[in-house]
């Protein structure tokens, strides 16, 4: 149970992205006119999830230990 609570953000993001793709897929296969409000909400939620994981914040977290190492700071304190 601890493993699930540690990864709840990742699990929710995967659910949002999979459900968004499923909604787009169902609207494109069948002749269903998508509701504009749902479409905007899905695109916003999916871009928020993808932006969180692949955005600039993930790159800056990875860059800090490298910058400290290159600057000669041996104590890598966070």
Image (spheres, grey):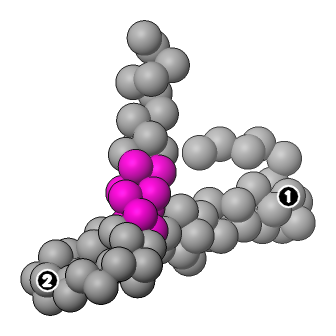
Residue 40 seen by the camera: no
Q: CA distance from mark 2 to mark 1?
A: 51 Å
Confirm whether the magenta stretch covers residue 17.
yes
Q: Nearer the viewer, residue 7 or 77?
A: 7
Q: Nearer the viewer, residue 12 or 18?
A: 18
Q: Secondary structure at mark 2?
A: loop
Residue 74 seen by the camera: yes
Image side of residue 2 versus residue 67, left or right: left
**Residue at the spot of label 2:** 35
Residue 46's place in the image compared with 29, above or below, is above
* Residue 66 point in image, percent of width and height: 81, 62
The tag earlier along the polypeptide, 2 or 1, is 2
Q: Secondary structure at mark 1?
A: helix
Residue 51's place in the image compared with 76, above or below, is below
The secondary structure that dominates the magenta segment is helix
Image side of residue 45 versus residue 9, left or right: left
The residue depicted at 58 percent of the width and 70 percent of the height is 54
The residue depicted at 84 percent of the width and 67 percent of the height is 71
* Neighbours of disc 1 within 10 Å: few (<14), some (14-19), many (20+): few
Magenta stretch?
Answer: 14-22
Q: Residue furthest front?
A: 31
**Residue at the spot of label 1:** 69
Q: Nearer the viewer, residue 38 or 1?
A: 38
Confirm whether the magenta stretch covers residue 20.
yes
């Amino acid at each position: 149970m601890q493993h699930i609570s540690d990864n709840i953000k990742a699990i929710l993001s995967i659910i949002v992205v999979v459900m968004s793709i499923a909604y787009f897929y169902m609207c494109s296969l069948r002749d269903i006119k998508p509701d504009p409000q749902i479409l905007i909400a899905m695109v916003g939620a999916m871009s928020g999830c993808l932006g969180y994981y692949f955005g600039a914040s993930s790159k800056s977290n990875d860059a800090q230990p490298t910058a400290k190492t290159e600057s000669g700071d041996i104590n890598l304190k966070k």
